[in-house]
Image (tube, rainbow, N blue to C red):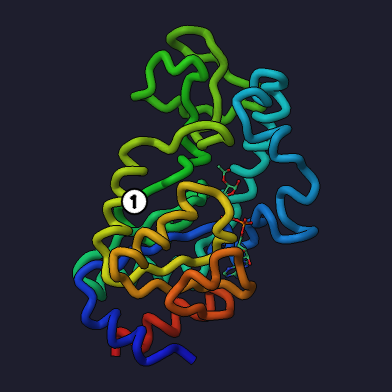
Amino acid sequence: MLPESLLVRLRDARHVCVLTGAGVSAESGVPTFRDAQQGLWAQYDPMELATPEAFQRDPELVWRWYRWRRELVSRAEPNAGHRALAELQDLVPRLTLVTQNVDGLHQRAGSQDVIEFHGNLFSNHCFARCNDDHPVDRDDAKVPVCPDCGASVRPGVVWFGEGIPEEALNASFAAAADCDVFLSVGTSSIVYPAAGLGTIAYESGAMTIEVNPNPTEQSGTFTSTLRGNAAVILPKLIELLAH
Ligand code: OAD
């Protein structure tokens, strides 16, 4: 059951900030990264795939992996958890939705102004960054080359060792520091700087809630935790908030 105190705080909230991770897309059939066995990392070593060095070493392998993920995500549908967050934006004065996911499912569920902390699977760009303004809208089987400079085209996602897009970073930190309620949904809270947003919110006086069927390294740092699946808990939260 949801704590009454959370509903009271949500009803009075001026600004709600939500951080999502791969767990919110799990019920859409999109594998998470670290869930044992079926997680993406179970059969791959992330250092072999999600780094600039991996792409330089074997661009075709990395390109194929992301192309496989794009096809998988294109076949997936937003789930009730995504839809609940899209509804939440109409129930509170201000909602900032920050996602670590690159699957675009929040937008397909109707969420506006989603902050994509780790980029997006569907926005490729030139590896040499000759012209960041125009994503290269290609999905060739082989690694495309940049039409402007001939360098390889790469997926528009943030790789290990790369910085978070500055606008996304600043907007997310500002929202965490300003919000009255912070929801962390479906993330193992392992990868920084995204994993630091909950603490910023908590230290700024927000009520912070973790929504996850499993405990995480940071569970003890939240005001409270709701143990369960996002596609079950979030719709229940919205139903109680809307009535
Ligand atoms: P993880 O795979 O690390 O964690 C997924 C979390 O979702 C786990 O804590 C699960 O318990 C939880 N979970 C699973 N099913 C769920 C459900 N139905 N409802 C709610 N939670 C559920 O994925 P992330 O935390 O998103 O970064 O990983 C963070 C970052 O690490 C990713 O963005 C990616 C990865 O490396 C980059 O690639 C830069």
Tell me the amino acid under the disc marked 1.
Answer: Ser
In the rendered image, which quarter contains the C terminus?
bottom left
Q: Which residue appears at 58% of the width and 79% of the height? A: 228
Residue 18 falls in which quadrant of the image? bottom left
Q: Which residue appears at 46% of the width and 47% of the height? A: 193
Q: Which residue appears at 36% of the width and 84% of the height? A: 6
Q: Position of residue 47 (x, y in %)?
A: 70, 35
Q: Position of residue 234 (x, y in %)?
A: 45, 77
Residue 204 falls in which quadrant of the image? bottom left
Q: Which residue appears at 65% of the width and 18% of the height? A: 56
Q: Where is residue 141 in the image (x, y as percent from the top left)?
A: 66, 27
Q: Nearer the viewer, residue 14 or 61?
A: 14
Helix or strand or loop: what does disc 1 sit on?
Answer: helix
Per the image, the residue denoted by label 1 is: 172
Q: Position of residue 129 (x, y in %)?
A: 44, 18
Q: Nearer the viewer, residue 242 or 158?
A: 158
Above or below, comparing residue 71 to residue 20 in the picture: above
Q: Which residue is at the far top?
A: 149
